[in-house]
Amino acid sequence: MPKSLERSPPKPTTEDYIGARLLETLIEAEPALKLLSEGLVRNATGRAFQAWSAFLTA
């Protein structure tokens, strides 16, 4: 077995997890705002919910 498969990958830190969730928040919020400006309220609502959910898990 190759040495690279013998060890498990390092566990992410709390700061890494929070950073990833905040980045996800920004990534989801951008299309939500774009859809809202185009008048696509229903689609924007779904994206905004995803952004809010990611923010709350951070």
Image: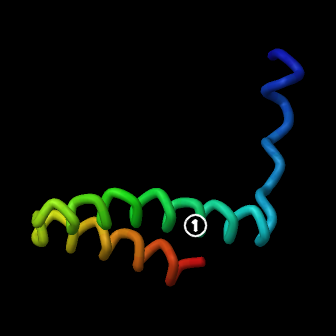
Return the residue found at the far right: 3
Mark 1 nearby-residue class (10 Å; few <14, some 14–19, many ≥20)? some
Q: Position of residue 39 (x, y in %)?
A: 11, 66
Q: Nearer the viewer, residue 9 or 55?
A: 55
Q: Is residue 39 above or below residue 58?
A: above
Q: Nearer the viewer, residue 30 or 19?
A: 30
Q: Name the kind of residue labelled 1 in the image.
A: Arg
Left or right of 38 on screen, residue 12: right
Q: Is residue 2 above or below residue 36?
A: above
> Which residue is pictured at 41% across the width and 71% down the height?
51
Q: Position of residue 35 (x, y in %)?
A: 21, 60
Query: In the rendered view of the protein, which quadrant contains the N terminus?
Result: top right
> Which residue is pictured at 47% across the width and 57% down the height?
27
Left or right of 46 on screen, residue 51: right
Q: Position of residue 12 (x, y in %)?
A: 77, 58
Return the residue found at the far bottom: 56
> Which residue is pictured at 11% across the width and 64% down the height?
40
